[in-house]
Image (tube, coloured by chain):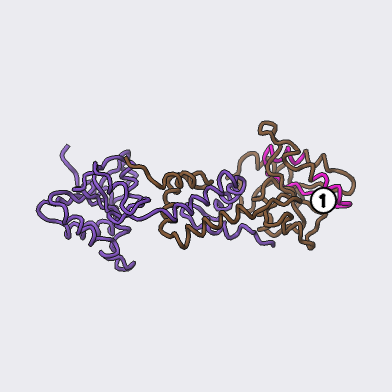
Chain colours: A purple, B brown
């Protein structure tokens, strides 16, 4: 019947991952009910972040400087590079607090179909970084999918040499995982890679 | 280990209804990967809408003018007022395309605990609107909850008079509803209000 003047905003919100039309409507109304405290600050911050966030020239992480804080941090072990597919994976590793080396964010996996070759994934840059390390390790932390592992293998072959250890995250039963809920693939991998107790 | 410069933005996004920390992270990264096409336009639109949207002085709807397009529309039947709790309910009614009268948005239900009395819900304004209607109808479309119905009854008693019909939406089995999935409350209402076939 009558047009909704918030139609355009709601459509934009509904395209965000995690939001559909219904939750976009709720979000829009929530924002409008809190214009000063929520809506305007959010608009301001989105604009500010969009204009100030940079992609690290060294590793592909997101930060406010050309080289990210991880690459700048001299306390980090620059001889160990953890290769991840996405910035979200880097954040996950950082949240876990288990790695004190540096990263390399590929921005995806090798995919001829999607036009993602070594160049698009910054693999040449990774090769150059690795060449500067006399003795070190490259940890392949791509996803446990066919594409992720294919990409890992390709990178491993490019970088393997005396002095450069190539490792990969273990695949198997996730912590807390009950076997009867797992898929065949995961069980297969867990069995194949079994280790002495 | 290292701070996430997007922490603040992600926190803001996670407070939106429908988004949690995980989807807020995904949304933030999605926006950053599409700064020009998605992030900056969204920031612009949020800011623009926040600064231009008004609450209709007549009915409480949201629009760009002091009086909303529904209240302005002379083709609408101003002798019939549909009372709803929230703008979202008004939108739902308009999407269904089943009502050609005007609305009154309460902004909630009567609740002494939450400090919502007749004044906060604009009920005095509704009483004034109804007084200007010689012969008409007030349709109570508050939610089918205890608070919603209590509020409806209060309004009905305030507005009831010769020439002003007070009606309420039917409560019962939702369309497509299978009885064995319904709760006792709904079944009870549906039985109590049964009608001749």
**Nearest the eye: A142 or B182:** A142
Q: Is residue A86 visible?
A: no
As drawn, B138 above or below B146 = below
Report helix, strand or loop for mark 1.
strand
| Residue B108, picture quadrant | top right
As drawn, B129 above or below B98 = above
Please give the name of the residue rendered at 58% of the width and 60% of the height, measured from the top-left corner.
Answer: A8
Please give the name of the residue rendered at 75% of the width and 38% of the height, measured from the top-left corner.
Answer: B118
Q: Measured from the top left, where is residue A53 in percent x and y?
A: 40, 53
According to the picture, the residue beneath numbered tag 1 turns out to be: B137
Mark 1 closeness class: few <14, some 14–19, many ≥20 residues within 10 Å: many
Q: Is residue B66 visible?
A: yes
Horizontal arrangement in the rendering, residue B5 relative to residue A137 (left or right)? right
Please give the name of the residue rendered at 52% of the width and 57% of the height, measured from the top-left corner.
Answer: B42
Q: Measured from the top left, where is residue A103 in percent x and y?
A: 27, 50
Horizontal arrangement in the rendering, residue B61 relative to residue A160 (left or right)? right
**Nearest the eye: B133 or A122:** A122
Number of on-image labels: 1
Horizontal arrangement in the rendering, residue B37 relative to residue B102 (left or right)? left
| Residue A96, picture quadrant | top left
Horizontal arrangement in the rendering, residue A117 relative to residue B43 (left or right)? left
Q: Measured from the top left, where is residue A133 in percent x and y?
A: 16, 52
As drawn, B194 above or below B36 = above
Query: Magenta stretch?
Result: B126-153
Q: Chain of mark 1?
A: B
In magenta stretch: residue B133: yes
Q: Measured from the top left, where is residue A51 in percent x and y?
A: 44, 56
């Amino acid at each position: 019947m009558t047009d909704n003047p918030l139609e355009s905003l709601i459509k934009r919100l509904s395209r965000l991952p995690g939001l559909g039309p219904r939750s976009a409507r709720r979000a829009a109304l929530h924002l409008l009910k809190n214009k000063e405290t929520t809506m305007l600050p959010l608009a301001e911050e989105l604009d500010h972040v969009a204009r100030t966030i940079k992609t690290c020239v060294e590793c592909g992480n997101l930060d406010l400087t050309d080289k990210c804080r991880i690459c700048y941090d001299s306390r980090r072990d620059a001889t160990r590079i953890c290769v991840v597919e996405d910035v979200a994976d880097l954040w996950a590793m950082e949240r876990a607090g288990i790695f004190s080396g540096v990263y390399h964010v590929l921005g995806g996996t090798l995919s001829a179909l999607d036009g993602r070759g070594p160049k698009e994934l910054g693999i040449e840059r990774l090769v150059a970084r690795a060449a500067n390390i006399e003795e070190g390790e490259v940890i392949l932390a791509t996803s446990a999918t066919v594409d992720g592992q294919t990409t890992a293998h390709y990178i491993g072959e490019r970088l393997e040499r005396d002095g450069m250890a190539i490792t990969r995250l273990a695949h198997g039963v996730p912590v807390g995982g009950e076997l009867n809920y797992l898929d065949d693939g995961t069980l297969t991998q867990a069995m194949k890679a079994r280790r002495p107790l």
